[in-house]
Image: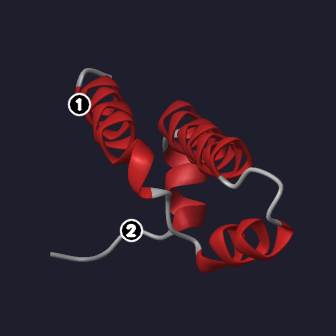
Amino acid sequence: MSKITIDQVKKLHPEVFNSIFQAGIKSERFRVSAWLDNSGNNLTDLNKGISSGTHPEAINDELTALNLRVERKLRNQ
């Protein structure tokens, strides 16, 4: 099985590419917002959290639900 490149997806399936891209933007906004909401006034924790690329523990269930919705949407296209 050959692998498809990002450029091929963009060219051959622009609606799928856009959906994936928008889901990524939404996920990253959600992650950064979660750090902003959960860090209080501690800028060191905020910086470390955002830079880590991870999510605060408090939102793991919400993130799982979001990922499941995105996966279902992509499967149904």
On residue 4, the disc is: 2
For badge 1, the amino acid type reads: Arg
- The alpha-carbon separation of the residues under discs 2 and 1 comes to 17 Å
**Nearer the observer, 13 or 39:** 39
- Callout 2 touching callout 1 (CB < 8 Å): no
Query: Residue 1 at what x, y percent from top left?
Result: 14, 75
Q: Position of residue 69 (x, y in %)?
A: 32, 26
Q: How is the image coloured?
A: secondary structure
> What's the mark number on residue 34?
none
Residue 18: which quarter of the image?
top right
* Residue at the image point whose x is 38% and y is 33% from the top: 66
Q: Alpha-carbon neighbours of circle 1 within 10 Å: few (<14), some, or many (≥20)? A: few
Which mark is first along the chain, 1 or 2? Answer: 2
Q: Is residue 2 left or right of residue 48?
A: left
Q: Residue at x 62, y 48 (%)?
A: 38
Q: Position of residue 7 (x, y in %)?
A: 60, 64
Q: Nearer the viewer, residue 34 or 75?
A: 34
Percent x, y for residue 63? 39, 42
* Residue beneath disc 1: 75
Quarter of the picture containing the C terminus is top left
Q: Residue at x 69, y 55 (%)?
A: 39
67 left or right, relative to 10: left
Residue type indicated by callout 2: Ile
Q: Secondary structure at mark 2?
A: loop
User: Where 48 sits versus 13, above or below?
Assistant: below
Q: Residue furthest left?
A: 1
Residue shown at 26%/34% (left/top)? 68
**Which is more toward the observer, 30 or 19?**
30
